[in-house]
Image (spheres, helix red, strand yellow):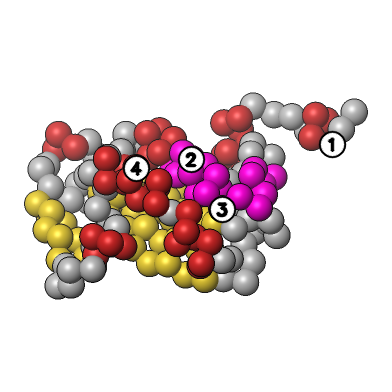
Amino acid sequence: MSVQNQFKVPRRRVFNSLIAVGLASVALLSTNGHAATNTESKLDRTIVNPWDWREYMGLVQGNEVKNVSSIFFVGGQASVDEYAATVHPGDMGKQIAHAFDKLEIVLGEAGYELSDVVRLTYYTTDIAKFRKEFGPTLERLKAKNCNPSAALIGVAELANPDLMFELEATAVK
């Protein structure tokens, strides 16, 4: 029996375990200490963007958000399976797409959408490959009205040696 099959547990339990050990972290904060829904307030969101090149890069310099009822922090989304093993090793484009698929799942579990994301931080082991392969994801973000401020950070290595991309996000309602 393989080690993977020997330790097979339900997906939600694995996900919760990953959170507990710090491989993925998700936190929900509310202004009143309770989970809040979008019906409690309407966001007043202003994009601050003093430079025109933002359209080319697919980001904004800043998001001012007023009347926020909750903030959702998502960390550690990467192209890994339920056992934290890398999916799509060596393929930057597929790793980026898979990490964004996982981001949408986490957001959805908490009642958020990509359009609620105001901040993304990208970590990559190869900035040149990231730039070459990010186009489809940029189109995906635009199609879902996601206009986050963002940072791209080059790193020597991520949690798994064959991971090339990871992201963190902040969403608001």
The percent position of residue 25, horizontal first and vertical second, equals 50, 51
Residue for point 64% across, 27% down = 10
The disc labelled 2 sits on which kind of residue?
Lys
Marks 2/3: CA–CA distance: 15 Å
SS of the residue under disc 3: helix
Q: Does label 2 or label 3 sit earlier along the sequence?
A: 3
The percent position of residue 166, horizontal first and vertical second, equals 52, 56
User: What range is drawn magenta here?
Assistant: 84-103
SS of the residue under disc 4: helix
Residue of label 1: 3
The disc labelled 3 sits on which kind of residue?
Met
Residue 91 painted magenta: yes
Residue for point 80% across, 29% down = 5
| Other-residue count near label 3 (Cα within 10 Å), few / some / many at <14 / 14–19 / ≥20 | many
Q: Is residue 52 above or below residue 96?
A: below
- In this rendered view, identify the residue nearer to me: 57 or 84: 57
The disc labelled 1 sits on which kind of residue?
Val
Q: Which mark is residue 102?
A: 2
- In this rendered view, identify the residue nearer to me: 52 or 110: 52
